[in-house]
């Protein structure tokens, strides 16, 4: 996540929390605005605005902490932060039920509805978390480079099939060029897969397993994205370069 979307997201959450907690914005809370006047008065007196506002402040702090951890070099900082983000939302949904008016101001039907909402939120959080972990695991697996008669197939996440006739040049650089921001892909420390901005090359397709050189740089005749490839060990990268070069020749 780049700094601008992060700051915008944090700013929106802080503004929302401030409105709800200090400026009488309880009507922004789901379920509050559809309650009866007596129920709203009860929830307001019990401090539902301060409760929800504080939780939204916490959500903003979690996003900021994840971003700072990622910038400090902790590869999974943001992923861990998003896990906490989901857990905090579920906790808030469970705890906010204590603001429901007792007795005649609430009904068993409403209680059942609230329980269904909380259960659905928990299930959704578990599914989302499992999906994120699974997608990261799948995307971070090393690709296979399969040589066909007329094309090179790169398997796995963000894989592609590259016809040898499309290749304009193949070279082996000793160092990685400076990698800019991610357009769409996986950024897991030394593992970079997907579409990134690269200095002097523009948007490129990366399949990198090491933060160090050498790196194979493939350019295409049709002005498509250059492809940058390396493996965990320099010798493996060199061997792969020789195979690609022989196929192109």
Image (cartoon, grey):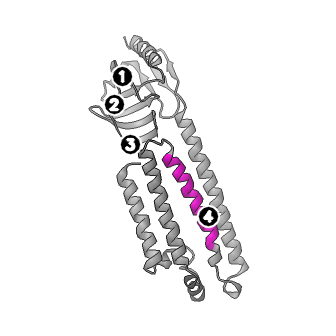
Q: On the picture, is 21 further left or further right than 180?
A: right
Image coordinates for residue 151, horizontal then vertical, percent: 45, 20
Say whether marks 1 and 2 touch (CB < 8 Å).
yes
Which residue appears at 61% of the width and 62% of the height? 90
Q: Which residue is mark 1?
A: 166
Dot 4: within a 10 Å radius of its alpha carbon, few (fewer than 14), some, or many (20 or more) residues? some
Q: Which residues are magenta?
A: 77-96
Give the spatial CA distance, label 2 vs label 4. 47 Å
Q: Quadrant of residue 10?
A: bottom left
Q: Is residue 203 above or below residue 72?
A: above
Residue 172 among magenta residues: no
Q: Main secondary structure of the magenta part?
A: helix
Q: Which residue is mark 4?
A: 91
Say whether marks 3 and 2 touch (CB < 8 Å).
no
Q: Is residue 220 above or below residue 64?
A: above
**Helix, strand or loop status at disc 2:** loop
Image coordinates for residue 112, horizontal then vertical, percent: 71, 72
- Which of the two labelled residues, at mark 1 and mark 4, occupies the earlier sequence position? 4
Give the spatial CA distance, label 1 vs label 4. 53 Å
The disc at residue 183 is 3
């Amino acid at each position: 996540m780049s700094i601008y979307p992060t700051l915008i997201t944090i700013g929106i959450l802080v503004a929302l929390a401030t409105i709800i907690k200090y400026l009488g914005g309880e009507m922004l809370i789901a379920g509050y605005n559809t309650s009866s006047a007596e129920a709203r008065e009860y929830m307001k007196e019990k401090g539902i605005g301060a409760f929800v506002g504080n939780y939204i402040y916490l959500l903003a702090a979690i996003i900021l902490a994840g971003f700072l951890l990622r910038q400090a070099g902790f590869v999974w900082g943001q992923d861990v932060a998003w896990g906490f983000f989901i857990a905090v939302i579920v906790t808030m949904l469970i705890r906010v039920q204590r603001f429901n008016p007792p007795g005649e101001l609430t009904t068993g039907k409403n209680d059942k509805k609230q329980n269904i909402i909380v259960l659905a939120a928990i299930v959704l959080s578990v599914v989302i978390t499992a999906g994120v972990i699974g997608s990261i695991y799948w995307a971070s697996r090393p690709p296979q480079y399969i040589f066909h008669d007329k094309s090179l197939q790169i398997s796995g996440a963000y894989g592609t099939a590259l016809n040898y006739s499309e290749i304009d040049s193949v070279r082996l650089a000793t160092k990685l060029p400076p990698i800019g921001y991610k357009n769409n892909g996986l950024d897991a420390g030394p593992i970079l897969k997907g579409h990134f901005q690269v200095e002097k090359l523009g948007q490129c397709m990366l399949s990198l397993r090491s933060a160090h050189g050498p790196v194979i740089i493939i350019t295409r005749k049709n002005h498509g994205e250059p492809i940058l490839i390396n493996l965990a060990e320099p010798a493996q990268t060199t061997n792969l370069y020789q195979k690609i070069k022989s196929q192109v020749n």
